[in-house]
C-alpha cells in the first residue's frame, strides 16, 4: 500500500489477520478434504469386505444344503441299515 506521495505503508494489522485467517482456512479445507477422501475410501473398503463375507456365508450355506441333498439316504453300519430323515 502506498500513500499519495509514493511512500510505502506497512500492511495493517487487520489485513495481516485477514491473510492469516484466509491461509489457515485454505489449509484446513485442504486437510479436511484429504481426511474425507481417506475416510470415504475406508468406508468403501470395509463395505466391500462385509459384502464379500456375507457372500461367502451364503455360498457356504448353499453348498451345505446341496451336500445334504446329495448325501445317501441310508448307510450300512455293522450290518444294520440306518436311514436319515429328510
Image (cartoon, grey):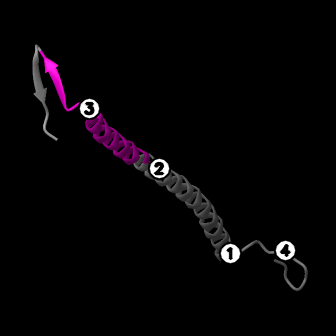
Residue 84 in the image: above or below residue 11: above
Q: Earlier in the sequence, mark 1 or mark 4?
A: 4
| Badge 2 element | helix
Residue 30 in the image: above or below residue 47: below
User: Which residue was labeled with disc 2?
Assistant: 48
State left or right for residue 11 relative to residue 57. right
Q: CA distance from mark 1 to mark 2?
A: 49 Å
The location of residue 46, given as percent across then percent down, is 44, 49
Q: Earlier in the sequence, mark 2 or mark 3?
A: 2
Q: Main secondary structure of the magenta part?
A: helix
User: Which residue was labeled with disc 4?
Assistant: 8
Q: Are marks 3 and 1 in contact (CB under 8 Å)?
A: no
Q: CA distance from mark 1 to mark 4?
A: 15 Å
Characterize the local packing of mark 4: few (<14), some (14-19) or many (20 or more) Cα atoms within 10 angstroms.
few
Q: CA distance from mark 2 to mark 3?
A: 34 Å
Segment colored magenta: 52-77
Frontmost residue, 82 versus 66: 82
Q: Which mark is residue 71?
A: 3
**Mark 1 against mark 4, which lies toward the viewer?**
1
Quadrant in which residue 20 is drawn: bottom right
State left or right for residue 29 relative to residue 86. right
Characterize the local packing of mark 1: few (<14), some (14-19) or many (20 or more) Cα atoms within 10 angstroms.
few
Characterize the local packing of mark 3: few (<14), some (14-19) or many (20 or more) Cα atoms within 10 angstroms.
few
Amino acid at each position: 500500500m502506498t500513500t499519495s506521495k509514493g511512500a510505502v505503508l506497512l500492511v495493517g494489522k487487520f489485513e495481516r489477520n485477514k491473510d492469516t485467517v484466509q491461509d489457515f482456512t485454505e489449509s484446513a479445507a485442504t486437510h479436511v478434504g484429504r481426511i474425507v477422501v481417506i475416510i470415504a475410501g475406508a468406508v468403501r473398503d470395509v463395505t466391500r469386505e462385509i459384502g464379500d463375507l456375507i457372500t461367502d456365508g451364503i455360498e457356504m450355506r448353499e453348498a451345505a444344503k446341496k451336500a445334504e441333498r446329495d448325501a445317501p439316504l441310508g448307510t450300512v453300519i455293522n450290518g444294520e441299515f440306518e436311514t436319515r430323515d429328510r
